[in-house]
Image (cartoon, rainbow, N blue to C red):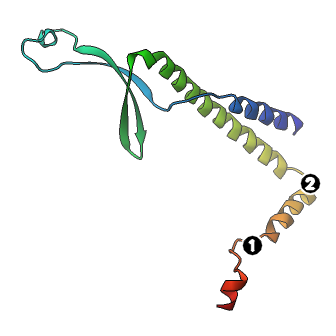
Amino acid sequence: MEDLEEKRKRVRERLVEVGDMRQGSLIERYVKCGKVNCRCAKEKAYGHGPSFTVTKAIKGKTITRVIPKQAVELTKAQIAQFREFRRLSQEFLEVNEEICDAKLKEPRSEIDNVQKKSSRRSLRPRLSEKSKNS
C-alpha cells in the first residue's frame, strides 16, 4: 500500500509541473486560391502556404483556430504538454483504482469505519429554519 501511495504522490507532483497546454492537432495546409492565372492553378502545383491551424472536436463539432507561423513551435510544445497531461491523468486514475482495490482487501473493520463516516452525511439537502417554517 505504501508503494502505491508513493507512486500516486509522484504522479501528482508531475501533474503539477505540466505547463501551458493546448488540446488538438496542428495541421499544415496549402490552399489553392481559385484564380485561373495563379501559380497554384497549374497541375501538380502546391497551393499557397503553408498556413497552420489547430483543430479539435468539442461536442461533436470541429473547432479550427489559425496559428501564426511564428507560433508553430510554441504550439507544438503546448500540444505535447497536453498529451503529457492526459497520460499522467490516466496514470493517476489507474494508481487510485489500485489503491481503492487494495483498501477493499483491508480488514473488515477498516471498511466499516469508512461506511460509518459516510452514512452520517445525508444525501438530501437540509432545509434551513426559514424554509421549515414556511
Locate residue 5: give its quadrant. top right
Q: In the rendered structure, which disc, 1 or 2, sits on the residue that comes first in sequence?
A: 2
Tell me if residue 44 comes above or below residue 124 in the rendering: above
- Determine contact: label 1, label 2, CB under 8 Å: no
Residue placed under numbered mark 1 in the picture: 122
In the displayed structure image, the side of residue 130 where residue 69 appears, left or right: left
Residue placed under numbered mark 2 in the picture: 107
Amino acid type at circle 1 is Ser
Mark 2: give few (<14), some (14-19) or many (20+) Cα within 10 Å: few
* x and y percentages locating residue 3 in the rendered image: 86, 33
Amino acid type at circle 2 is Pro
Locate residue 66: give its quadrant. top left
Secondary structure of the residue carrying numbered label 2: loop
* x and y percentages locating residue 41 in the rendered image: 12, 13
Q: Quadrant of the N terminus?
A: top right
Front residue of 92/77: it is 77
Q: Quadrant of the C terminus?
A: bottom right
At 51% from the left and 26% from the top, the residue drawn is 79
Front residue of 121/132: it is 132
